[in-house]
Image: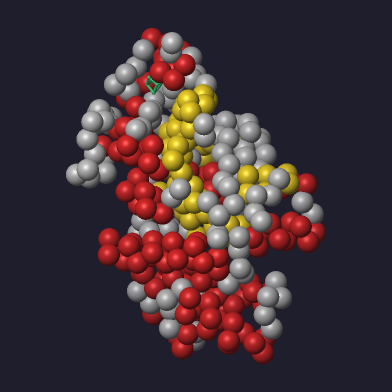
Amino acid sequence: KLDFAGRIARSLGSNMREERVQAVDSVDLSVMPGEVLGLVGESGCGKSTLGRMLCGILPRSEGKIYYKGQDVDTLKGQALKEYNVNVQMIFQDPFASLNPRKRVRKIIGEAPLFHKLTTSSELNDYLAKVMLRCGLDPSYTHRYPHQFSGGQRQRIGIARAMAVQPECLVCDESVAALDVSIQAQILNLFMELRNELNLTCLFISHDLGVVEHISDRIAVMYLGRVVEVASVDDIFNNPFHPYTKALLNEVPRLDRRGVDFTPLEGEIPSPLDPPSGCHFHPRCPRVMDICKTEKPVDTEVAPGRRVCCHLATMP
Ligand code: SF4
Ligand code: MG
């Protein structure tokens, strides 16, 4: 039913402090209908920028986004409205993303009323259903966001997105601000919603451990570029890219053996002045001369598995 091809073919940029930053560079990614694609990388690598562009919150400098095979720039009228409703974003910080002066009734109910998914007379029942499904007490519709805990506020954020019956969610660090026990509850809620409604998700996180259980495939980003895309199993048990290996090193697990892990040293360089060649070369334990000057190309190393590293094209 859903053919979400979030495909950004060329380079994209955004302005930061009057300097032009190529926050997302030559990213080409697809998310299949009903699939959860985890997008991981250190903070500042461009994950959020990418997510915001997909939702139309940030403009692209170049590149294309296709939704169900359609170039979103060509959508007009009803089709554009459908795209905007069908692709919903869930943010990291439930404090910042919920209007403190609005009651929950308005926060969750505004959009479905506007899009005529319900009527004023049926709104109470509609809200009750959505809130219950998201683990919220429907009798709290008169409350304000500050009257809820952090976990409940994130549930409100999810309910607000779910209230318009989206097909696709872009979740940006949606559990990062929560305690570990609450994180697990919210991740479970995402998995339930996804299974029941066959939702398509782009699940953005700096933490590989968070995306592991919820994702079908994982894309790893470094300084604006996607460096590896593979199934969860391959990422965890047979990682290719030196950066993926380094990220994995930060996920504590007992059952990983036989994979060569190297700790990641140094800070992520500034996106204002990224290293030449392979952006990862100053930190890479496998760095070669070619890495310092030549940008590695995106290579399919196995069906559905892509790596951007000179090691992938070595004979
Ligand atoms: Fe390391 Fe070179 Fe591969 Fe970059 S291209 S990840 S520097 S081996
Ligand atoms: Mg971010």
Q: Would residue 87 appear left or right of 291 to someone viewing this image?
A: right
Q: At x 40% / y 18%, what residue is drawn?
A: 311
Residue 102 visible at all:
no
- What x and y, as percent, mark residue 66? 68, 44
Q: Is residue 203 above or below residue 287?
A: below
Residue 293 visible at all:
yes
- For this orientation, the residue located farthest to the front is 303
Q: Is residue 292 above or below residue 171?
A: above
Q: Looking at the image, how many numbered discs can be counted on the residues?
A: 0
Residue 30 placement: quadrant: top right
Looking at the rendering, in which quadrant would you find the N terminus? bottom right
Residue 126 placement: quadrant: bottom right
Q: At x 32% / y 18%, what residue is drawn?
A: 286
Q: Would residue 181 appear left or right of 34 to someone viewing this image?
A: left
Q: Would residue 10 appear left or right of 279 to someone viewing this image?
A: right
Q: Is residue 87 above or below residue 103?
A: above
- What x and y, as percent, mark residue 230? 45, 37
Q: Would residue 199 appear left or right of 154 to someone viewing this image?
A: right
- For this orientation, the residue located farthest to the left is 254
Looking at the rendering, in which quadrant would you find the C terminus? top left
**Looking at the image, what colour scheme do you see?**
secondary structure
Q: At x 44% / y 70%, what residue is drawn?
A: 155
- What x and y, as percent, mark residue 31? 56, 46
Dividing the image into four quarters, tell me where ligand 1 lies: top left
Q: At x 36% / y 56%, what residue is drawn?
A: 176
User: Depth check: 302 or 189 in front?
Assistant: 302
User: Depth check: 220 or 109 in front?
Assistant: 220
- What x and y, as percent, mark residue 303? 52, 31
